[in-house]
Image: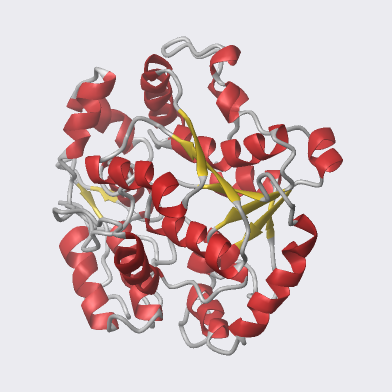
Amino acid sequence: MTKLDLPPIKWCVRCVYPSSSAVPLKFDEHGVCSGCRVHDQKKRIDWDERLKWLREEVEPYRKSSGYECVIGVSGGKDSYYQAHFVKEKLGLKPLLVTYNGNNYLDVGWRNMLRMKEVFGVDHIIISPSVDMLIRINRLGFRKTGDMNWHAHAGIFTQPMKIAAQFNIPLVFWGEHGFTDVGGMLSMNDFPEFTYRYRKDQGLRGYDWWDFTNDAEDPIQENELECYKYPNDELIEKIGLRGLFIGNFDAWDANAHTRLITEKYKWEPSPTPFERTYRRMSNLDDRYENGAHDYLKYVKFGYGRATDHASKDIRSGYMKREEGVEMVRQYDHVRSSDINFWLDYVGRREEWFDAITDTFRSAKVWTKHDDGSWRKRNIWDSAVPA
């Protein structure tokens, strides 16, 4: 066995995020990551004042009849809280929009279908052709290392597209992901949802045209209509905006889950996941906690348990030592739903592994002479925590 020569990955001394994070992080002179530092800002914010600001901001969008805003929903915990916030705290009438990528767990599908009933609203569900979805699953995996690229594209496109088509200029989203996870922006910056945010952060720099003209999995442009964002002229004409609720609300997934479970009878997963300890996340997409998340582990050296533990540490629900143990227990697990996905797309495990290995980062992984891959971990004594 050759001696490992691993890059100097480091971990935040407060949460459990590594410097190889998929969301860019910075570490200060104390070893605390930018995500933790920005989270600290939330403790100093007057959230009642923020809510007042938002109510004033949305006042011009109120109507005597018709839809006053759009919310992109999957039926998950965040979707329920967004609908609750918009209806109960802002008093607006929303139109719900869902992209159905054909990945739902049974409990997630049940939660999603109940939204129109528990909130008393209209709900549009866009369901692409399953034949096309199988091809774009394979192509997304081969091109980006993510079979779920289409799901990100769908949910980041359809709410804005439907809003433009219905002449509804206001769309609500949850938290600003790169700020919430990595501290990309200050809590005083108030970013809004834009085409650039969608492509650069949500879709990792790809767009629908990158998925045409592939010889192995051919997809025609007319099959990709649901991923086409409204053009600039239409956006400007109706004044289309996307507001992040997390800029105006002390976003807390655990508190939200308690609220929606008690008030709306939302259901968490009845069974544990293989790659994380939470049962409340990603019920709309069986691969997010499974095969998709395993690919993140391969690409960046960490997974969903790191995400969840870091958020829970920041919010005071977990000690860092407990978070490290969650990472140790879950992040490396090879999810069994990889086999489910391979059956879905008609491919074999050898094909999956060969492509997966091409996405391993040299910053994280070293290959041994025996063909095995190794990386340093947060609990390794040789690496300062």
Q: Quadrant of residue 244?
A: bottom right
Q: Is residue 93 left or right of residue 292?
A: right
Depth check: 253 or 67 in front?
67
Residue 167 visible in the displayed image: yes
Reply above or below: 181 against 337: below
Reply above or below: 163 against 312: above
Query: Where is residue 66 shown, x and y percent of the image?
Result: 68, 44
Q: Quadrant of residue 357?
A: top left
Q: Is residue 32 left or right of residue 173?
A: left
| Number of marks in picture | 0
**Split into 4 quadrants, where in the image is the C terminus?**
bottom left
Depth check: 304 or 367 in front?
304
Q: Quadrant of residue 198?
A: top right
Residue at the image point whose x is 74% and y is 57% from the top: 62
Scheme of image coloration:
secondary structure
Residue at the image point whose x is 62% and y is 87% from the top: 46
Depth check: 296 or 47 in front?
47
Query: Where is residue 86 shown, x and y percent of the image?
Result: 57, 61
Reply above or below: 242 against 99: below
Residue at the image point whose x is 43% and y is 23% from the top: 136
Reply above or below: 334 against 213: below
Residue 189 visible in the displayed image: no
Query: Where is residue 319 shown, x and y percent of the image?
Result: 27, 84
Residue at the image point whose x is 40% and y is 37% from the top: 146
Query: Where is residue 312 shown, x and y percent of the image?
Result: 34, 75
